[in-house]
């Protein structure tokens, strides 16, 4: 699975257009972000169900892009994502 993610990062590194990647934080992502000057927005996602049926868990995730990420408000995640996609189109 990490091999596939690394392959994706290598592909994004060569990409001529814009990209917006949503993923869990990971060391390879941090390395690629620093090496390529990508932009990252870290956030926490609350999962209401877990594999073993336990209580809710929080996971650190990140939006990574090869263009500046500007967010006006993080209170409404749908508004944030739609704003980011709109920037990507522009």
Image (cartoon, grey):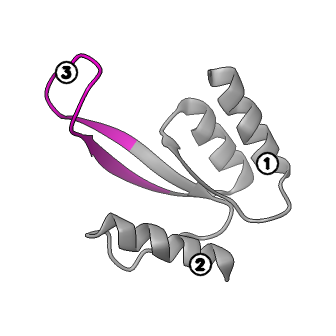
**Residue drawn 64% across the image and 48% down it:** 33
Tell me the CA gap for discs 1 and 3. 38 Å
Tell me the CA gap for discs 3 and 2. 38 Å
Residue 1 got which mark?
none
Kindly state the secondary structure of the residue where label 3 is placed: loop
Pointer 1 residue: 13
Q: Is the residue 52 above or below the residue 87 in the image?
A: above
How many numbered marks are there?
3
Q: Residue furthest top?
A: 52
Decide which of tag 1 and tag 3 comes sooner along the chain. Answer: 1
Specify whether residue 71 is painted magenta.
no
Which quarter of the rendered picture does the N terminus lie within?
A: top right
Task: Check if mark 1's residue and mark 3's residue have beta carbons within 8 Å.
Answer: no
Kindly state the secondary structure of the residue where label 2 is placed: helix
Pointer 2 residue: 87
Badge 1 local density, few (<14 within 10 Å), some, or many (20+)? Answer: some
| Magenta residues (range) | 41-60
Q: Position of residue 85 (x, y in %)?
A: 56, 71
Q: Position of residue 79 (x, y in %)?
A: 38, 74
Left or right: where 43 falls relative to 24: left
Depth check, mark 2 against mark 1: the one in front is 2
Pointer 3 residue: 53
Badge 2 local density, few (<14 within 10 Å), some, or many (20+)? Answer: few
Q: Position of residue 4 (x, y in %)?
A: 70, 27
Which quarter of the rendered picture does the C terminus lie within?
A: bottom right
Q: Position of residue 2 (x, y in %)?
A: 63, 23
Q: Is the residue 49 above or below the residue 39 in the image?
A: above
Depth check, mark 1 against mark 3: the one in front is 3
């Amino acid at each position: 699975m990490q091999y596939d993610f690394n392959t994706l990062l290598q592909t994004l590194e060569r990409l001529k257009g814009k990209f917006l990647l949503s993923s869990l934080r990971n060391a390879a992502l941090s390395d690629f972000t620093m090496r390529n000057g990508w932009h990252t927005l870290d956030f926490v996602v609350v999962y209401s169900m877990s594999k073993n049926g336990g209580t809710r868990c929080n996971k650190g995730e990140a939006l990574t892009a090869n263009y500046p990420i500007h967010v006006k408000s993080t209170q409404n995640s749908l508004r944030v994502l739609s704003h980011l996609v709109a920037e990507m189109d522009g």
